[in-house]
Image (cartoon, grey):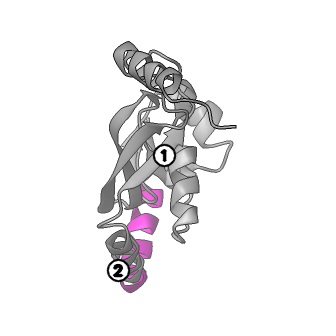
Amino acid sequence: MEIILKEDIIGLGYKNDIVNVKNGYGRNYLIPQGKGVIASPSAKKQLAEDLKQQAHKIAALKAEAEKRAEALKDVALTISAKVSATGVTYGSVGAANVAEELKKLGIEVDRKIITMHDAKKVGDYEATVHFHKEVEIKVPVKVVAENAPVVAAPVETVVEEVAKIEETPAEE
């Protein structure tokens, strides 16, 4: 079944795209939710006319998206998370955490346009921000341990320090 999308749906397509979907998905979800319409010949003709009339508006939206992407060009995020002794995070770091960190930097990005595989361990990951169907940028994300493990001092050092304390006479 061919559907004309009325809004961006990550993983399926962008607004005004004509996509093929299964009948049940189109009739039971996309059309009732107002996210798409059936791509009949008259609807396709109307879409072509609308796109022709809105060409300058679409170009302005793309330019705005490129400007927003340019602001993220040199951004690298470091997100701290609580980590177990084995290096596995309690919970996971995902798109919502990335959006929150960007907001702290003064860059307002909706979490719905960010895709990232959930980070369940400490390490380096990559989040993709989709500003426009032709403009997307990859942001490096480093997940670090919030509660860094405490490194114990070697036993020899502790024994030497105790011996020094015992040798020095107590001044009273």
Type of residue at label 1?
Ile
Decide: is 172 above or below 48. Answer: above
Which residue is label 1 attached to?
A: 79
- For this rendering, which residue is in front, 171 or 96? 171
Total marks shown come to: 2
Q: The residue tagged with tag 2: helix, strand or loop?
A: helix
Which residue is label 2 attached to?
A: 63
Q: Residue at x 46, y 58 (%)?
A: 15
Does 140 appear in magenta? no
Type of residue at label 2?
Ala
Q: Residue at x 65, y 50 (%)?
A: 34
Report whether residue 164 is seen: yes
Which stretch is magenta?
Answer: 37-57
Does 44 appear in magenta? yes
Decide: is 144 above or below 68. Answer: above
Q: Residue at x 56, y 46 (%)?
A: 97
Decide: is 129 above or below 127. Answer: below
- For this rendering, which residue is in front, 50 or 106? 106
Q: Residue at x 43, y 33 (%)?
A: 21
Decide: is 67 above or below 102. Answer: below
- Magenta stretch: helix, strand or loop mostly: helix
Residue 103 on image: x %, y % = 57, 63
Residue 44 on image: x %, y % = 41, 59
- For this rendering, which residue is in front, 54 or 87? 87
Camera-nearest label, 1 or 2: 1
Residue 58 on image: x %, y % = 39, 77
